[in-house]
Image: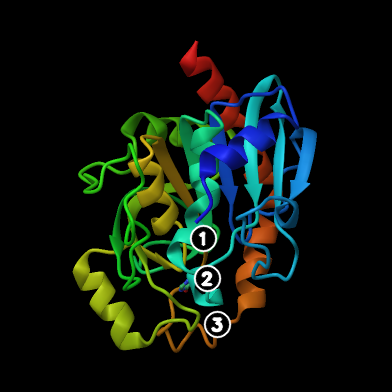
């Protein structure tokens, strides 16, 4: 694995902006950057160590810019474990953001509702997670200077959940709070799996975010994660067959609210740091 410090040093030459806030835009959120004033965009293929092919087939981009005057660095597009990447490769960009000076990271994703009271189009602030991916991004050689055994008692920062609540209110999004269960995918779940996940205490299910959250905690970042509930999780025969295009379409229908949410979150975060 490359040294994230070396890649960060290279990227620092590209822009004088040093955002304390990083964002990872997952499926559905990709087109929610309308409110961002982008100063510099670099495609992942130009950055050594960054994984290149995403689920939509579009190249991912690292974007540095400002929401109003709040600086932010955005990973637009992520790759997933189910695409075949190793966990350390998948989470390398998070390590680079930490070396670039990011202190807070907002992870976004599309997820299926396990909790029966959730509706398509709701948002959920992640309060805790269950790693059901069968893999761990911290496996492998230790990173010098970082903890080997990472405490996960409180992965998702309470103050950031409160910021997300305020930003959702301003953006007219209904925000739930709950437990995100991560699977490796890429298949959607069976009815028996969803019943089991409900019993385990999950409110939403998805195929991302947890590896990044774990690595971000190892790097000492404050973490927030927000899901767009794009569908009822598999197994509801009344809802019919799930398709990736429906998942993306739900995300797209919330685009304006999401764009406003991301901006408000960034502005509130910048104020809270002053
Ligand atoms: N299951 C797993 N991942 C998902 C889902 C789902 O129902 N919806 C969006 N991502």
Report the mark closest to the observer, 3 or 2.
2
Residue 85 badge: 2
Q: Is residue 172 visible?
A: no
Q: Is residue 234 above or below residue 113?
A: below
Measured as percent of width and height from the top left, residue 43 is found at 75, 52
Q: Earlier in the sequence, mark 1 or mark 2?
A: 2
Asked if the residue at label 3 sits under 8 Å from ligand 1, the reply is yes
70 on left or right of 92? right
Dots 3, 2 in contact, CB < 8 A? no
Q: Earlier in the sequence, mark 3 or mark 1?
A: 1
Which residue is pictured at 61% across the width and 42% down the height?
7
Measured as percent of width and height from the top left, residue 172 is found at 58, 40
Residue 242 badge: 3
Q: What is the crowding at mark 2: few (fewer than 14 residues within 10 Å), some, or many (at least 20)? A: few
Determine whether the residue tagged by mark 1 lies in a helix, strand or loop.
Answer: helix
Q: What is the crowding at mark 1: few (fewer than 14 residues within 10 Å), some, or many (at least 20)? A: many
Q: Is residue 127 above or below residue 38?
A: below
Measured as percent of width and height from the top left, residue 150 is found at 24, 46
Figure disc tally: 3
Dots 1, 2 in contact, CB < 8 A? yes
Of 82 and 201, nearer the camera is 82
Determine whether the residue tagged by mark 2 lies in a helix, strand or loop.
Answer: loop
43 on left or right of 217? right
Which residue is pictured at 20% across the width and 44% down the height?
153
Task: Estimate the spatial distance between the alpha carbons at disc 3 and disc 1, rounded to whole Å.
Answer: 26 Å
Report the mark closest to the observer, 3 or 1.
1
Dots 3, 1 in contact, CB < 8 A? no
Instruction: Return the residue at label 1.
Output: 90
Task: Estimate the spatial distance between the alpha carbons at disc 1 and disc 2, rounded to whole Å.
Answer: 6 Å
Task: Estimate the spatial distance between the alpha carbons at disc 3 and disc 2, rounded to whole Å.
Answer: 24 Å
Q: Earlier in the sequence, mark 3 or mark 2?
A: 2
Of 120 and 87, nearer the camera is 87
């Amino acid at each position: 694995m490359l040294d994230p410090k070396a890649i960060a040093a290279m990227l620092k030459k590209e822009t004088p902006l040093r955002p304390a806030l990083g964002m990872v835009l997952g499926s559905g959120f990709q087109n929610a950057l309308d409110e961002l004033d982008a100063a510099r965009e670099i495609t992942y293929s130009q950055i050594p160590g960054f994984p290149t092919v995403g689920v939509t087939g579009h190249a991912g981009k690292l974007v540095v810019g400002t929401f109003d005057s709040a600086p932010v660095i955005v990973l637009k597009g992520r790759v997933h474990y189910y695409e075949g990447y190793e966990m350390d490769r998948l989470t390398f960009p998070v390590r680079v953001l930490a070396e670039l000076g990011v202190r807070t990271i907002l992870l976004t994703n599309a997820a299926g509702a396990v909790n029966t009271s959730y509706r398509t189009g709701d948002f959920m602030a992640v309060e805790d997670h269950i790693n059901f991916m069968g893999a761990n991004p911290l496996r492998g050689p230790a990173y010098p200077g970082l903890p080997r055994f990472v405490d996960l008692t409180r992965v998702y920062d309470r103050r950031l959940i409160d910021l997300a609540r305020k930003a959702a209110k301003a953006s007219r999004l209904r925000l739930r709070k709950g437990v995100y269960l991560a699977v490796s995918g890429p298949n959607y779940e069976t009815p028996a799996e969803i019943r089991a996940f409900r019993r385990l205490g999950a409110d939403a299910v998805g195929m991302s975010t947890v590896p990044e959250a774990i690595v971000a905690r190892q790097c000492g970042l404050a973490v927030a994660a927000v899901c767009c509930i794009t569908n009822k999780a598999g197994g509801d025969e009344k809802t019919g067959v799930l398709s990736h295009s429906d998942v993306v379409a739900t995300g797209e229908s919330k685009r304006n609210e999401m764009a406003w949410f991301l901006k408000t979150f960034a502005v509130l975060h910048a104020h809270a740091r002053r």
